[in-house]
Amino acid sequence: MAQNMINDERIMQEVIDAIVHTTGVEKDTITPDSSLVEDLGVLSLDFLDVNFRLEQVFGVKMARNFVLEHVEELFGEGMAIDENNEVTEKGVEILKMRLSEAAGDLEPGTPMDELPALVTPKTLAFAVKDIFSYLPEKSPAGADWKTEDGTRIVCSQTGEPAALPSGDEVVQNWLKSLQEEKQLF
């Protein structure tokens, strides 16, 4: 179901707030396309804190693994990451589908440790929206959904939070649908 209770602007606002709170970067220096690593100086431990804050705000579980790690797990080692820990041609193709313009200049042979530079507020907001896209039409009680604090989706009847898949499950589902639709693997 397309979730429309939490709009894109609110999601982006919360992503930017999580980055500001975690890093101390000035809010007005952050754009949706800012690289967290290259433009904002976010360190690897900061990524964990940003994700944790987003989980707390939205009541979701963000992905713990990068999309290419899921490719390797689901479809075999060497599919997306080669023996030199560099992105393969198939890995580039998948990242360009998943991250759109954030991965526009990516080339096969890019070292994996350079990929965190592709993460932007826009890609984080997409990850949150992607999880919300799995919201069922109705709650298990058969009731409509509502937002709590404008960011958490709960059952309007019971107040129970929506049971949504984790970000890792969402990525895995997406990869499996790619396999079925486009026979990429």
Image (cartoon, grey):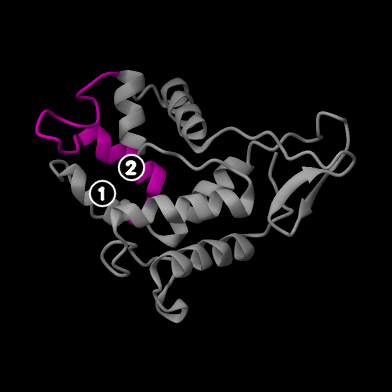
From this view, report whether residue 169 is shown above or below residue 48: above
Which circle, 2 or 1, is nearer the viewer? Answer: 1
Q: State the image coordinates of residue 169 (x, y, percent, origin top left).
A: 50, 30
Q: Is residue 80 magenta?
A: yes
Question: In percent of the image, x 29 and y 38: which residue is there?
Answer: 93
Disc number for residue 17: none
Q: How many numbered marks appear?
A: 2
Residue 12 left/right relative to 26: right
Report the Cα–Cα distance between label 2 and label 1. 10 Å
Quadrant showing the N terminus: top right
The residue beneath circle 2 is: 95
Q: Is residue 155 magenta?
A: no
SS of the residue under disc 2:
helix
Magenta region = 76-102
**The residue under label 2 is which amino acid type?**
Leu
- What is the quadrant of residue 81 in the picture? top left
**The residue under label 1 is which amino acid type?**
Leu
How many residues crowd around disc 1 within 10 Å: few (fewer than 14), some, or many (20 or more)?
some
Q: State the image coordinates of residue 105 (x, y, percent, origin top left).
A: 23, 55
SS of the residue under disc 1:
helix
- What is the quadrant of residue 57 in the picture? bottom right
Question: In percent of the image, x 30 and y 53: which residue is there?
Answer: 44
Contact between marks 2 and 1 (CB within 8 A): the answer is yes
The residue beneath circle 1 is: 115
Task: Give the mark, 2 or 1, whose residue is nearer the N terminus.
Answer: 2
Residue 88 left/right relative to 21: left
Q: Would residue 7 be seen by someone viewing this image from the given angle?
A: yes
